[in-house]
Amino acid sequence: MKNKPMKGKMVLKMEGMCQAFPGVQALKDVDMEVYEGEVLGLVGKNGAGKSTLVRILMGLQVPDAGRITIDGKSYERMASSAALRAGVAYVPQIVNMMDSLSVAENILAGDMPVNRFGFVDWKEVYREAENRLEKLGLHLDVRKPAEGLKVAEKTMLAIAKALFGNTRLIILDECTAPLPYCDIELLFNFIKSLEGRGVAFIYISHHLEEVFEICHRVTVLRDGFMAGTCRVADLDMDKMARLIAGEDVKEYQRAASSSRDKPVLKTEPMPKTGPVLKIEGLTRRGSYEDINLTLQEGEVVGLSGLQGCGAEDLAAGLFGMERRGVGTVTINGKPFTARSPQEAFRQGLALLPQDRSKYGMVGIRPVRENVTYPILDRIGNFLGLIRLGEEKNLVDRYIDSLGIKTPGREEIVKQLSGGNQQKVVFAKLAAAGPAVLILHEPTAGVDIRAKQDIFRIVDDLASRGSAILVISSEAREQVGLCDRVIVMYRGRMVKEFRKGDPDLTPENIVHAIEGNL
């Protein structure tokens, strides 16, 4: 995006924001300004203070010090109701819907049209909901229950709801993480169309290429402090990465087995038994067709495609979350017959889900318990009692190796930032050391340094025999991490790229997932 001068009226000003938690200085003298028609990027590593700053702005956290000004009105303490009245809207990283209600009811909740008798005018409800979605170019059945929507559809629905009404400032928190490329472009075009109307945006993302495309300026936080606010036109990718990390960060390339660093995990190599995962003729009408896939011991295979290509359904079917369909699946030569996640896990297959808050963690329990739930039998003695010292050492090792920013192993997981919650879920699965590990968007919402940590864990698990399937929309990451990248298009596997082939480039993967073979 071409940057433009800040000619509009100042919509938001935050001055001297400070916030401390036990053992953590979350914010220290942070300033931020946003103007009419501006898209301000807010970036930083997990735990840098972004979530705390947004919670203060939304009236969900009382700061220790600082002042907030919205459209000229100052607040030392912002209440959530005042933020809404001032026209501040928030689209979170993890979207929560009223799943039992329809799409239309979710869009118009709190503002349902009524007829002259005071009853809900359902015809008008559906008409208004369809009009709002149409303006975004979204085509959803507004009468359909929200529980039937995929993650990407729920995210777009939340954006649609935020973009209407008397909204002055919209906070987008990792909103593109579950979206395919075509929908990201649709969203960006809509954002650009609103600039002329004076709507301001705070755009929170770990995808730096998106910041360069959509933002005018960017504010960088590092460990609770201001690292700087710059015009995007004055930066390049390397400069921004240095501001975020405080050091040079190189793009990850999976090392050859002979040159790997000392392993992070302490797991025993699996015995060589031929292909770890073998899928033959797997078909589920309307989702995927004639899937044939073999994963070898220690192999990392990428699976790429647009939303609805069948990759997400395939993962859910294999893990027992949905009906798998017809065809044969074996793990280490044995028939894989799991019809539930519990059975899948017992038979050696684990899934890192995209919706991790719902399926991947127990938010009200501490980090320690979340990491060790799957391996209690391994860290228990002959009486079934947990060896506490071994448990603590294991959890501390993962906190350190994955860079999980937490006051301690007993911190409740839901109190952590979204990115750190994600790393806790990853630590849980890595500790289990499954034969087959399916990772669904493993780096979504994770900062630059944490991505490096996750890649190293993936590499280390592969070196010990796990077969790993990575479902991701991040073509550049797949090139660096995967031995092979398979493209799915309309339910079929249509293209395969192999490491070392000159055709294995992010650009070629993007072309292939759009059907340009």
Image (cartoon, rainbow, N blue to C red):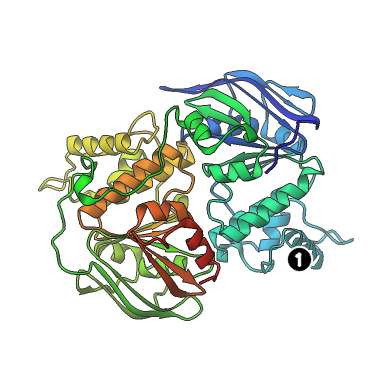
The image quarter containing residue 279 is bottom left
Residue matched to label 1: 126
Relative vertical location of residue 345 with respect to residue 452 in this rendering, above or below: below
Q: Dot 1: what SS?
A: helix
Relative vertical location of residue 378 with respect to residue 399 in this rendering, above or below: below
Which amino acid type is marked by label 1? Answer: Tyr
In this view of the protein, can residue 373 be seen by the observer?
no
Residue shown at 68% from the left, 37% from the top = 216
Relative vertical location of residue 272 with respect to residue 89 in this rendering, above or below: below
Residue 337 position, x and y percent, is 28, 74
Q: Quadrant of the N terminus?
A: top right
**How many residues crowd mark 1 within 10 Å: few (<14), some (14–19), many (20+)?**
many
Q: Which is nearer the eye, 200 or 383? A: 200
Compared across the picture, whether 130 is left or right of 458 comes to right
Residue 95 position, x and y percent, is 57, 51
Compared across the picture, whether 445 is left or right of 214 comes to left
Q: Which is nearer the eye, 516 or 123? A: 516
The image shows a total of numbered marks equal to: 1
Q: Which is nearer the eye, 431 or 306? A: 306
